[in-house]
Amino acid sequence: EPGAAVPAGQKGSWTSFLKAIASFSGDLSSLTAPPFILSPVSLTEFPAYWCERPELFAAISSGKNEEERALLVLKWFISTLKGQYSSRNEKMGSEKKPLNPVLGEVFFGTWPDRDGRGETRLIVEQVSHHPPVTAYHIQNASKGVTLQGHSAQKTSFSGGSIVVKQIGHAILDVKLESGVSEKYLITLPTLNIQGVWLGSPYTELGGSSVIQSSSGWNASIEYKGKGYFSGKVHSFKATLSHPHSHHHPHVVEGQWSTTSTPKTNISSSRVLERNGCFTDVNGPKEEVTVKSIEEQGPWESRNLWKVVSAGIRTGDFDTAAKDKSRIENEQRQRRKDEREAGTSWDLLYFDHVDEDPIYEKLAAMGQIVPATEDGYILKDAPLPHPPR
Ligand code: CLR
């Protein structure tokens, strides 16, 4: 029955929301959704999903050779997917519509040093408002592991589900003891948001993504839901190969939401879990540590959205809506002032490049399309935020 999971008073607005999505493709962020589907969390927080198993991120540089590091990168990547794509269902009962970040919104966090894994730091900046683009930089300096990327989405509606094509990419940089940097280009899977008709959306992954290393190792990951090669939700099959290797490629299969196992011989104990799994995300993950709201500046996400978030959390949607309008009006006024003054907004932490040279080189190695893409690179020193 349509809208079975939608609260009684919101069925009408859910139907209008679905109609708006169906007749529309591109940027979902501007559509008004009914209160039951609103998340109190801004999209600027999402890059933290990349590092909720900080020990796996740190372990990448401990790989003894190119092949082992490529396996460790694949293992870390697969182990992030549960957080990235099914944690809202676990925490809030369904996929929800995140807060649409404002231009210049930032989110900072750390995963503290523990058991010798070193500290990891996260810097996120909203670098575009329409369409929304989020840039991030995650670094474990003591282990020489850095992930830098940006994230945007193109949304359409197909066969009753919302299809979200991800725009952007991430580059992982692994600094070796020799001083040489190994690089990995990471492309992103397509989301299929199902269950929307009932009002209980959840994300399934589809299509494929790749991890292309400068060492030549190439991981190709295929994603399938229920009814495909394993018949189970959240399934994947990854193939890791090297063009000059005479060995058979490594193949890993399983579910990114639970466990996966190697289908070929992987003997390295650094790569496998104690139970022999390639990935096992049944155990707890570690959320990013963030300063308290009182200690945050006015552009920091949780401080900026605190009234809206509290309203959504407590069911006070009038207060939430009012403060959301205040924030949006302030944004509009800033853009108008800039137009009149003939100035433009400066990015604070990142520089935009039209053609990311590292992307181009790795994309050529792995025959990845498009051949070129833009990128965001962390500045040596950030600009100060204007007052708010
Ligand atoms: C952002 C980048 C992260 C992975 C990720 C996970 C969930 C995605 C999110 C990205 C972008 C926004 C998103 C969300 C799921 C739902 C939400 C597509 C790709 C849309 C805008 C909300 C749709 C509204 C329905 C749920 C009603 O690394």
Image (tube, rainbow, N blue to C red):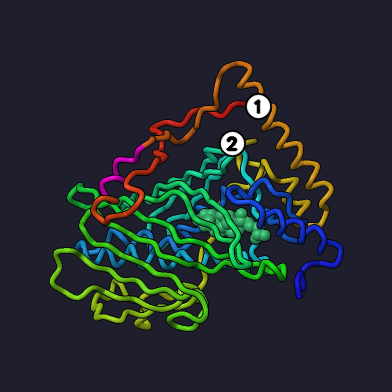
Residue denoted by label 2? 103
Residue 158: image x %, image y %?
59, 63
Relative to 294, is 66 above or below?
A: below
Q: Rate crowding at label 1 as few (under 14), some (14 to 19) or many (20 or more) other CA atoms within 10 Å.
A: some
| Tag 2: amino acid | Leu
Ligand 1 within 8 Å of the CB at mark 2: no
Residue 309: image x %, image y %?
72, 50
Magenta segment = 355-362
Q: Residue at x 61, y 65 (%)?
A: 161
Query: First in sequence: mark 1 or mark 2?
Result: 2
Quarter-wise, where is residue 360 in the image? top left
- In three-dimensional space, the C-alpha distance between marks 1 and 2, rounded to whole angstroms, equals 10 Å
Residue denoted by label 1? 334
Residue 361 located within the stretch drawn in magenta:
yes
Which element carries disc 2, helix, strand or loop? loop
Q: Residue at x 20, y 56 (%)?
A: 215
Residue 343 located within the stretch drawn in magenta:
no
Residue 278: image x %, image y %?
36, 76
